[in-house]
Each structure stands twice: as C-alpha cells, then as structure tokens.
Amino acid sequence: MLVQEELKRIGSVAKNSGLPIKTIRYYDELGLLKTFGRTEGNYRQFNSDVFGRLRFIKRAQGLGLSLLEIKEFLEVHDQGDLPCDHIKVKLGEKLSQIEQQIQQLQILKQELSGLLSGWKTVPEHSEDTI
Amino acid sequence: MLVQEELKRIGSVAKNSGLPIKTIRYYDELGLLKTFGRTEGNYRQFNSDVFGRLRFIKRAQGLGLSLLEIKEFLEVHDQGDLPCDHIKVKLGEKLSQIEQQIQQLQILKQELSGLLSGWKTVPEHSEDTI
DNA sequence: GTAAAGTGTCTAGCTGGCTGGAGAGTCAAG
DNA sequence: CTTGACTCTCCAGCCAGCTAGACACTTTAC
C-alpha cells in the first residue's frame, strides 16, 4: 500500500532547500528535476525526491561539474538500469578525473600550507614551486 | 654571479604553456603574471617563472578557485614573507575548504561508481541516495 | 468578492572567463 | 625598404549559470 505522497510547490521546495525559486525553475527548464506534472493552475509539483536531487546537484556542482554533466548522471540514475556502454565510458572517465582531482587537491593543499607555515623555508625548490 | 636570464615574449610563452595568447594577456591584465616590464616596442617580457605560475593557475582553477582567489595566493607568494593575519585566516579557511572538497569528491566517487556497478544493488538506501 | 501571496512566462541583464576582430605599431629577413 | 610575422590596445561578443523585472493568472485568507 503506497501512501499517496503530498506534492510540494516551488515555494516550499525553495524554502526547504535554501535555493532561490528562480534557480529551481532554471534547473527544471534544463531538465534536471523531473517535476511531477503541473496542477490545474499550471503550478509545478514536486515530490520529496527533489531535495535529494538538489543536494546532489549542489554537491556535484561545487566540485566543478557542469549542469549538463550532472544532468547526464541524473538521467542514468533515473533510467535505473545498467547504463549503456557509451555512458559507462563517460562515467569511468569522470571517475578517474575525480581521482586526479583529489590528487591535485592534495598538491594544492601542500602548496597552500607551505604559504601558511612561512613559505621561505621552501624557497625555489626548482620544478614545481608555484 | 647571476646569469642574465633570457626573457620571453608572449608568443613563446603561449607555445610552451599551451595557453592561447589572449588568455595570457588576460591573466596579465588581471595582475596574475608579474611581467618583467616591456621592451622598447611595448612588448611584454616574461622570465621562465611564468610557466610555473601558469601551471599553478591552471591547477588551482581546475579545482574551482576563481582567478581572484588565485591572485591572492600568488600575491602572498610574491611578497615572500609571512602573510598578515587576515590572509592567514583566509588561507586557513581555504585549506579546510579543500579538505572538505576532498571528502565530497570521495562521496561523489562512490555515488558514481554506484551508478557504474549496477546501481540497483544500492536502491533507495534512504537519506542520501542521489 | 476582494486583497495578498504565490506562481507562471518572457525578456533582459549580470559576472566570470575567455575569444574574436579591427586597426596600428614593431621587428627580422631578404 | 618592403613584406610578413608578431605584438599592441580596444571593443565587442559568447557561454554558463543565474538573477531581476514586468505582467498575468491562481490560490488562499478574510
């Protein structure tokens, strides 16, 4: 027995997610959101999945993914079944990008802590000094 | 005895760094580059430090830092001595941001490998499913 | 029924980070 | 001395990702 879920309108989604209404509409326009249709009065309806989605978007975006890339991932998610080979490849690529990114971040972290902790202690050590 | 370093012009910097001339000029405009003055004919002159700088910029940028943030870091670097407290704080903040970012990346990595490896094996596990 | 709040679309504008083109000056080769 | 490659500045435009405003319609509260 599925409980009929209560659908939300854009305002409450905005309030609960912390994102501006305009942004949510924008994401919807781009097809990132899977609205649950519209009311009679043409108001967008969302179910509570939207919050997870928005969190995912925020996180991924904060990490430098574009909205289009994010959209692709969401689509894979939505289809539910195994992604086709093409997408598999893309996902694999993205994954190794991410690993690289982690490494780069670690380098940057070192460089910045170098700056913090006095810097002059590591002067001009050739090659990859800033 | 310092060997007089041979200065480069923008074209060769572009060639050796792989960046378009326009981009280099743009960075220079924003004050990211510390050119070595100009020739008589008003041509920019760079010494070989510029390559390290450009690599740093690329890396940092790829990780989501804005050119302005990057500029600040470069300035700290250029001053050479201990950054003032204000900057220290900013650096510290940025460092913890970076650590967070690393964690987020690890989460994203998991989520994406979830997608890759079939996804349905981890269905709707509440809370933070995409 | 009426006012206020919420939502819709549409169009336009903004910021950051480039990128392209015009028009002019500089420099190196023949 | 001219030609061609290189560089300069300036100004305009592009893309992503919003954001703001105008104006109309819907819903809710009284």
Image (cartoon, coloured by chain):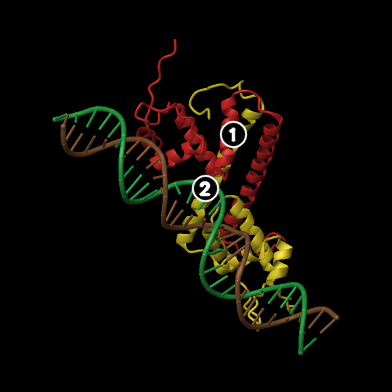
Chain colours: A yellow, B red, C green, D brown
Residue type of the residue flagged with mark 2: Ser
Q: Is residue A104 above or below residue B47?
A: below
What is the secondary structure assignment of the residue under circle 2?
A: helix
Residue A12: % across, % down:
73, 69
Q: Is residue A103 visible?
A: no
Return the chain for callout 2.
Answer: A
Q: Is residue A49 visible?
A: yes
Q: Quadrant of the N terminus of chain B?
A: top left
Asked if the residues shown at circle 1 and circle 2 are in contact, with their CB atoms under 8 angstroms apart, the answer is: no
Residue A64: % across, % down:
56, 50
Q: Is residue A64 above or below residue B4?
A: below
Question: What is the crowding at mark 2: few (fewer than 14 residues within 10 Å), some, or many (at least 20)?
Answer: few
Report the side of B110 relative to B29 (left or right). right
Residue A78: % across, % down:
58, 68
Q: Is residue B68 above or below residue B9?
A: below
Alpha carbon of mark 1 to alpha carbon of mark 2: how far? 28 Å
Residue B41: % across, % down:
34, 29
Residue lying at 67% horizontally and 72% vertically, measured from the top left: A46
What is the secondary structure assignment of the residue under circle 1?
A: helix
Residue lying at 57% horizontally and 45% vertically, measured from the top left: B64
Front residue (pair D24, A12): D24
**Residue B107: assigned label:** none
Residue lying at 61% horizontally and 56% vertically, measured from the top left: B111
Report the side of B33 relative to B109 (left or right). left
* Tag 2 residue: A96
Residue type of the residue flagged with mark 1: Phe
Report the side of B52 relative to B18 (left or right). right
Name the image quarter holding residue B35: top left
* Tag 1 residue: B73
